[in-house]
Image: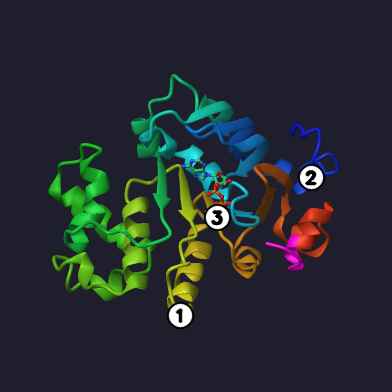
Amino acid sequence: MNIEKNPTEVASAPPIPAAAEQVPLRAKVENLNFYYADGTQALKGVNMPILDRQITAMIGPSGCGKSTLLRCFNRMHDLYPGNRYEGRISLMPENQNLVGPEADPVLVRLRIGMVFQKPNPFPKSIYENVAAGLRVRGVKNKAMIDEAVEAALRRAAIWDEVKDRLHRSAYDMSGGQQQRLCIARALAPNPEILLLDEPTSALDPIATAKIEDLVQELGRETTIVIVTHNMQQAARISARTAFMYLGELIEFGATDQIFSTPSHPRTEQYITGRYG
Ligand code: ADP
């Protein structure tokens, strides 16, 4: 795969490691630029593979563009006028450009699931929160919805805790349970990619550990892209890591390699805690 290098910051970034070549691609970020409505260029020529059924972590100092990049995958930026993409995020195997003018942002959002920093359940029952994603996709059959709700809650490792109170308000749950519910809601329609934007930053250490275990388990069968400011978390759960700095992708590689022998001095400075 030809991952083009940005002429400045990533001049010394290594090619994608050979091991990555053997894993099928789920998506490919190609020469992606992103501009906010006020003219801020938050992404500069980003090239990155997203490998199928692996966890890819995006790390880097605050303001480097991690969330901006994540939100391109499901066209969240289109909820605000004036934001602009250049380049491609090609979803495989169709090679469909998710950020192209021909891609309908609403349809993209139906295919790419997202979980946010703060748990944001709807003011509805636990059951209805998970069913919501199926209902907007036109599923009406009650037995089918019942089955999918249970399957999603099981995958999100929360079924046993909620199976006797499915019709109680989601607001009666703890923060960690709410976040696992939001993961179940995102999983129910079987998204092609699951985006996680700092999913544990509002949680206590015990709830965080549960979500990390869950994400790791999900990563065996789901393509996940996670933004985290917690480097230990990235090192623990991801197979691939992308290090970003000032809107550019500085280095991408196997997580072990990025954390043990980073190729770029800026990556090394960041992971050794010298800035950010
Ligand atoms: P990170 O997730 O790495 O902390 P962000 O993606 O949130 O970084 O931000 C990247 C850059 O884009 C920052 O310089 C930030 O100030 C800018 N930015 C974020 N949101 C907006 C916005 N709505 N309008 C203009 N600039 C923004």
The magenta region covers 270-276
Q: Which residue is mark 3?
A: 227
As drawn, the residue found furthest toward the front would be 38
Q: Which residue is mark 1?
A: 206
* Residue drawn where x is 43% and y is 28% of the image: 82
Counting labels gives 3
Q: Nearer the viewer, mark 1 or mark 2?
A: 1
Circle 1 SS class:
helix
Q: Is residue 20 above or below residue 123?
A: above
* Residue drawn where x is 79% and y is 41% of the image: 10
Query: Magenta stretch: residue 272 in it?
Result: yes
Q: Which mark is residue 159?
A: none
Question: Is residue 41 at least partly visible in the picture?
Answer: yes
Q: Position of residue 183 (x, y in %)?
A: 37, 58
Magenta-drawn stretch, dominant element (helix, strand or loop) = loop
Instruction: Give the side of residue 209 with respect to residue 80, left or right.
Output: right
As drawn, the residue found furthest toward the bottom would be 206
The answer to whether mark 3 is within 8 Å of ligand 1 is: yes
Q: Are marks 3 and 1 in contact (CB under 8 Å)?
A: no
Disc 3 from disc 2: Cα separation:
24 Å
